[in-house]
Image (cartoon, coloured by chain):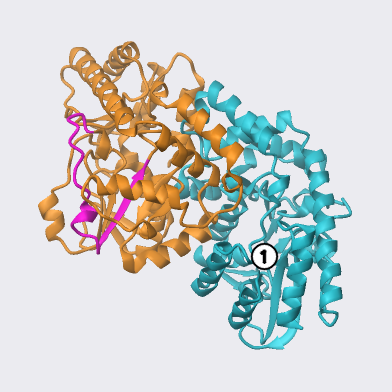
Chain colours: A orange, B cyan
Amino acid sequence: MDPRVVELQKEAAGRDDVIGLAGGLPADELLPRDALAKALADVTASRDDALQYGWPEGTEQLRGWIASRLAARGAHVDPERIIVTAGAQQALTISARVLRGTIAVGDATYAAAIDAFTRAGAKVARDHGGARYVIHGVANPQGVELVDRAALLASTGPLIVDEAYAELRFDGHTPRPLIADAPDRVWHIGTISKTIAPGLRIGWLIPPAKHHAAALDQKAAADLQTSSLTQAALARLVTQLDVDALIARARAAYREKAAALGEALHRAAPQLRFREPEGGFSIWIETGREGDDLALLRRCLDAGVMVDPGSAFRPEPVPTIAIRASYSNATPDQLAEAARRLARVLG
Amino acid sequence: MDPRVVELQKEAAGRDDVIGLAGGLPADELLPRDALAKALADVTASRDDALQYGWPEGTEQLRGWIASRLAARGAHVDPERIIVTAGAQQALTISARVLRGTIAVGDATYAAAIDAFTRAGAKVARDHGGARYVIHGVANPQGVELVDRAALLASTGPLIVDEAYAELRFDGHTPRPLIADAPDRVWHIGTISKTIAPGLRIGWLIPPAKHHAAALDQKAAADLQTSSLTQAALARLVTQLDVDALIARARAAYREKAAALGEALHRAAPQLRFREPEGGFSIWIETGREGDDLALLRRCLDAGVMVDPGSAFRPEPVPTIAIRASYSNATPDQLAEAARRLARVLG
């Protein structure tokens, strides 16, 4: 990430008068705080292994839960193949460390995936014949499904499939996991960061069987294992909480927030073009203007609203400016006001 | 790690009749379970940021605590320079990702450091003119101080200084941090895994100022950030718990365990040569025998005792077999019996 952007982000986070639409945070009010507190208390009191070292691949309980969630969606995966990671981010890094080469990511993609791939020694390109990275169900930053399932299944290279937002489609149609149909070349990546809590740092990677040993080796070398405590708490939480009901509530809440921001933008800045999100946390706005998006970000901040700069999501520079505005952790009132402030800058 | 060793480790962990002296786990009975449960309950109930995303460098509270602990030992470090990592292991990986090249580690060193360095794209060697990795205070696996402070300070290359066991010297003489005297080339690494709890996965890295941005970039790309929850819990815990008293109790307990294993080995296998540990978790036994240490490990397991194979700690192969026996998470009775079983294999 550009350190000048980080500086603006920190300024924004420290100012009460700035409405934050940057970063893509889940809504504070949707985090299952009480259930997590109970699960943490239970495992800390009862389980030595919650505070001790564990195996690099993660706990059997948690891998079993992950496998059962996938099985319910049509993908039958041996829990032995699952590697619990420090969020989806680490799963991206491990995939790239093993695959290397060039990874095709499209016109715009999750900014931190570009960082993960390049820092891990791979290259990224808009298009390329080798490995491909897709965000299945709802693309980030675009907010809509961009996966052409038939085309992907007809392709031949490795597929890094990120399901970060797959369960947060507003229509509730969580897609069938691609790993169900291309198990030999899909690197399946999931996370609880968008649906349960990012602060636990739990995600998972299911590499193709032939790459499992190399991926696990990278995981162990990177940090030995994912936190025993957060793994144990999550495994306990999911026995005490109706996860599907939690996700259904989250879907409904984010759908409302998306509508609130979309409508406010249409009112305040009718000339702005963007696609209505099908799910997830953000609206992606291609402004059509040329220029320096850092200067635009500064003007947004001066107007009291913070967004993410489109350039961070680009594998290759483009002349026009885009922004990503995340409605996920703001109230309807904040979203209406944020739209007016954005309109002053972009209008 | 050799997958055949991992297989034996898992067999050992699953068998009630095997006494485990492998892995270097802190004693279950020394983990501050109740205090951690309280800290977790406090932060989960009161702090949104404990469940949310945070900054890559870690929380201000925790970095402030780390800086204050170092200041008490004579090293005055700006908390802005500290990066909270997923255990010391991630700090090793990040150091190697930034430094690359060859890292000198001595005859035998922490096995997972060899993995971290090599998987991160660096090379390791017994001796070399470039960067050097040292475990300060108590070397692992040797159990004694191997740092020649004057020689290190007279050298010129980068120094990766791992303080994993620095506060666990039995004589209580925690050394002055090397970063106090060579701030421009020391990569200082610390952890709570040996003194508070490994399951939280919290360590830290203080790279030389000129490498801070590159190291932070690697941290963010690797996993975005260390768990907000475990950081918040630790920052709370250290305001509610006398950490120095906890460490003093741990020191006394490990000194007793070390003596128990050492005396039992002298009785059961008087011909075995080893140095009495000055601190830490393990006794390093160079058997003088030649051969395959995997076969020896198998024989240990059949005799009902598990240790770590010396070859895992070697940057370059040596013909003779060594083993690392960790007394840290066993009772005096178990240690006495383990010594008798080891004597049957090694005697």
Q: The C terminus of chain B lies in which quarter of the figure?
A: bottom right
Question: Residue B268, can we see it?
Answer: yes
- Looking at the image, residue B335 lies above or below residue A135: below
Please report, as a chain letter, where disc 1 is located.
B
In the rendered image, residue A270, in percent from the top left (x then y), is placed at 16, 17
Q: Nearer the viewer, residue A159 or B122?
A: A159
> Quadrant of the rendered structure where residue A333 is?
top left
Q: Residue at x 59, y 78 (%)?
A: B298
Query: Outermost residue toward the front?
Result: B17
* Residue at left offset 63%, top offset 42%: B82
On the image, the x and y values in percent for residue A76 come to 26, 55
The residue identified by callout 1 is: B19
Judge whether residue B113 is colored magenta.
no
Above/below status of A16 relative to A101: above
Return the x and y of residue A278 as percentages of the image width and height.
Answer: 19, 31
Element carrying mark 1:
strand
- Please tell me in which quadrant of the rendered image residue A223 appears: bottom right
Query: Depth check: B319 or A264 in front?
Result: B319
Residues in magenta, as a range:
A169-191
Task: Find residue A153 and report its image quarter.
Answer: bottom left
Type of secondary structure dominating the magenta stretch:
loop
Count all numbered tags in the image, as a single digit. 1
Q: Residue at x 72, y 54 (%)?
A: B163
A65 sits left or right of B136 in the view = left
Q: Is residue B59 left or right of residue A332?
A: right
Instruction: Identify the amino acid type marked 1.
Output: Ile
Q: Can the viewer see residue B100? A: no
Q: Is residue B166 above or below residue A197?
A: below
Task: State whether residue A331 is above or below residue B133.
Answer: above
The answer to whether residue A173 is magenta is yes
Residue at 47% in and 64% down: A217
